[in-house]
């Protein structure tokens, strides 16, 4: 059996969220008892909590919702690249060692020694726009990161997200890559078919080739 790496952090009330965003909350609508045969809960959360896929609608008023995007980028061969730790922004020199002629169309970047899972990192590692442009020129379909965003937390212009828009790239954020060796895998990270949402949680996994 092929080994599987679960690269989705657990989602609960302690999961960090972007300042001002909606944290995970859960309430029980019904609980098992002699009078009730089931447990039923109601949850509320931002679709950006935990491992998630941004939709073009997140960074463009005219963009597709996550329920409208093609699923192909979220499924298939990918490469995990370990970047130097403590980077403020991933530059081309930080990933050049792993960029080869046989680069798969999906790339996941590990930037943390241990992904922050209890507090939002206001100094999160971003990805430089020119990195995304160069990867798009090589046929990239999807970029993923263990960071909460590909742009600096304080950015108002979101230049790297705008490259996604212009180059029709997809992105996964908040992936848990702490225990994943660098190398090539099969990625499976399908978003929910949320018809009007700007993002979707994903249960992202890697499977050995």
Image (cartoon, rainbow, N blue to C red):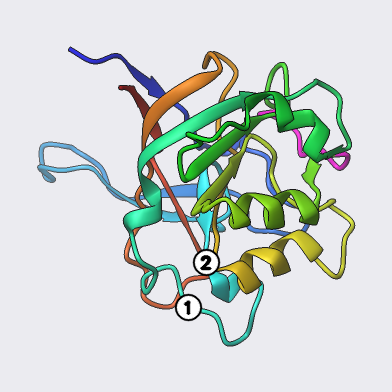
Q: Quadrant of the N terminus?
A: top left
Q: Mark 1: few, some, or many residues within 10 Å (few <14, many ≥20)? A: some
Q: Residue at x 55, y 42 (%)?
A: 50
Q: Which mark is residue 47?
A: none
Q: Mark 2: few, some, or many residues within 10 Å (few <14, many ≥20)? A: many
144 vs 193, nearest the viewer? 144
Quarter where residue 91 is shown: top right
Tell whether position 12 is magenta. Answer: no
The picture places residue 51, in percent across and down from the top left corner, at 52, 42
Q: Residue at x 43, y 68 (%)?
A: 66
Question: In the drawing, does residue 5 fall left or right of residue 113?
Answer: left
Residue ID for mark 2 = 55
Q: Chief secondary structure of the magenta span? A: loop
Residue ID for mark 1 = 64
Q: Is residue 118 above or below residue 44?
A: above
Q: What span is colored magenta in the figure?
A: 116-123
Q: Quadrant of the C terminus?
A: top left
Question: In the drawing, does residue 99 fall left or right of residue 45?
Answer: right
């Amino acid at each position: 059996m092929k080994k599987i790496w679960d690269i989705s952090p657990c989602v609960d009330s302690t999961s960090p969220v972007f300042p001002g965003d909606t944290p995970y909350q859960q309430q029980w609508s019904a609980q098992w008892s002699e009078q009730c045969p089931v447990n039923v809960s109601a949850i509320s959360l931002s679709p950006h909590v935990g491992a998630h896929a941004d939709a073009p609608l997140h960074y463009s008023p005219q963009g597709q919702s996550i329920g409208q995007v093609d699923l192909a980028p979220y499924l298939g061969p990918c490469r995990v690249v370990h970047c130097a730790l403590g980077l403020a922004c991933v530059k081309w020199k930080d990933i050049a060692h792993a960029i080869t002629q046989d680069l798969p169309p999906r790339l996941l970047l590990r930037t943390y020694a241990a992904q922050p899972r209890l507090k939002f990192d206001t100094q999160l590692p971003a990805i430089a726009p020119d990195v995304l442009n160069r990867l798009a020129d090589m046929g990239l379909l999807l970029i993923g990161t263990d960071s909460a965003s590909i742009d600096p937390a304080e950015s108002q212009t979101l230049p790297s997200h705008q490259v996604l828009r212009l180059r029709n790239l997809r992105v996964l954020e908040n992936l848990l890559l702490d225990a994943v060796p660098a190398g090539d895998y099969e990625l499976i990270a399908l978003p929910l078919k949320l018809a009007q949402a700007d993002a979707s949680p994903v249960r992202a996994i890697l499977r050995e080739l």
